């Protein structure tokens, strides 16, 4: 992995862009959460490449976090990654956002539930278990009422993810909480999880969509009114 990789993480309100080379992150930048990702992303990528004296054509590939998360952020990040990989004829690697978050869980943890807000008292949740140096998903991402998930928690399970701050006070006291800084995927986590993934084929690249799991609030509202 000596060739450079561009890393995009836009699953949250504030996005992140990184550049990796020789197995190390050599550049990183935060996207302004107040502004639209589609205004800042291209300019930020150009700046990071320029700072490392790289041309887009020198990239080995792009790694992108695909969700679940912000509808707008994921759309901008995934579509930008697809466009770059296609135009540059370089590799594209997708990283499940929850897998990146799980990889940041403290080393003393054996199992962790990663949660994100699905609105209206619902959460996205996926369980992971440590296997050697890596974390393995134990199930598919589910959408559950937060109260139902809390009732089924085991005392040995850690909790992480962007929705932890919403439900932290409702958790039993014996449940371990991941540190605040590890609840959102970092550029480093996306990169190191991505290193274990295979690049998409050209057909898979064309078919790639963000991992939404449910319609947006606007779409659900329109469906109810229709």
Image (cartoon, rainbow, N blue to C red):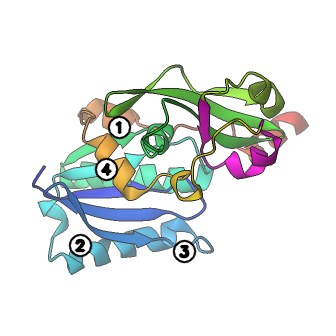
Q: Which residue is mark 1?
A: 206
Residue 170 belongs to magenta span = yes
Q: Quadrant of the C terminus?
A: top right
How far across and how far down the image is residue 72, in percent?
59, 55
Image mark for residue 191: 4
Q: Which residue is mark 2?
A: 49
Residue 31 in view in this figure: yes
Q: Which mark is residue 32?
A: 3
State whether residue 82 appears in this view: no
> Which residues lie in the magenta part?
157-172
Spatial CA span between label 4 and label 2: 17 Å
Residue at disc 2, secondary structure: helix
Report the Cα–Cα distance between label 4 and label 3.
21 Å
Q: Of label 4 and label 1, which has the lower sequence position? A: 4
Q: Are marks 4 and 3 in contact (CB under 8 Å)?
A: no
Marked residue nearer the N-terminal end (2 or 1): 2
Q: Residues within 10 Å of mark 3 (few under 14, many from 20)?
A: some
Question: Is 10 left or right of 18, judged from the image as shown?
Answer: right
Label whose residue precedes the other's in the sequence (4 or 3): 3
Marks 4, 2: nearer the viewer: 4
Classify 10 Å Cα crowding around label 1: few (below 14), some (14-19), many (20 and above).
few
Q: Looking at the image, do the residues carrying marks 4 and 2 touch, with CB atoms under 8 Å apart?
A: no
């Amino acid at each position: 992995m000596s060739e450079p990789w561009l890393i995009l993480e836009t699953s949250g309100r504030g996005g992140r862009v990184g550049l990796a080379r020789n197995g190390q992150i050599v550049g990183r930048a935060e996207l302004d959460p107040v502004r639209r990702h589609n205004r800042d992303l291209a300019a930020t990528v150009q700046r990071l490449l320029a700072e490392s004296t790289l041309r887009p054509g020198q990239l080995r590939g792009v790694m992108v976090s695909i969700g679940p998360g912000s509808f707008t952020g994921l759309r901008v990040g995934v579509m930008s990654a697809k466009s770059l990989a296609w135009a540059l004829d370089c590799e594209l690697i997708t990283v499940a956002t929850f897998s990146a978050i799980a990889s940041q869980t403290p080393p003393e943890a054996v199992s962790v539930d990663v949660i994100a807000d699905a609105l209206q008292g619902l959460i996205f949740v996926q369980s992971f278990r440590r296997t050697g140096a890596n974390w393995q998903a134990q199930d598919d991402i589910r959408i559950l009422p937060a109260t139902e998930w809390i009732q089924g928690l085991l005392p040995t399970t850690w909790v992480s993810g962007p929705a932890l701050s919403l439900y932290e006070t409702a958790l039993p006291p014996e449940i371990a909480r991941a540190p605040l800084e590890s609840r959102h995927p970092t550029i480093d986590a996306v990169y190191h999880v991505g290193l274990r993934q295979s690049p998409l084929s050209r057909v898979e690249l064309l078919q790639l969509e963000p991992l939404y799991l449910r319609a947006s609030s606007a779409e659900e509202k329109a469906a109810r009114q229709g």
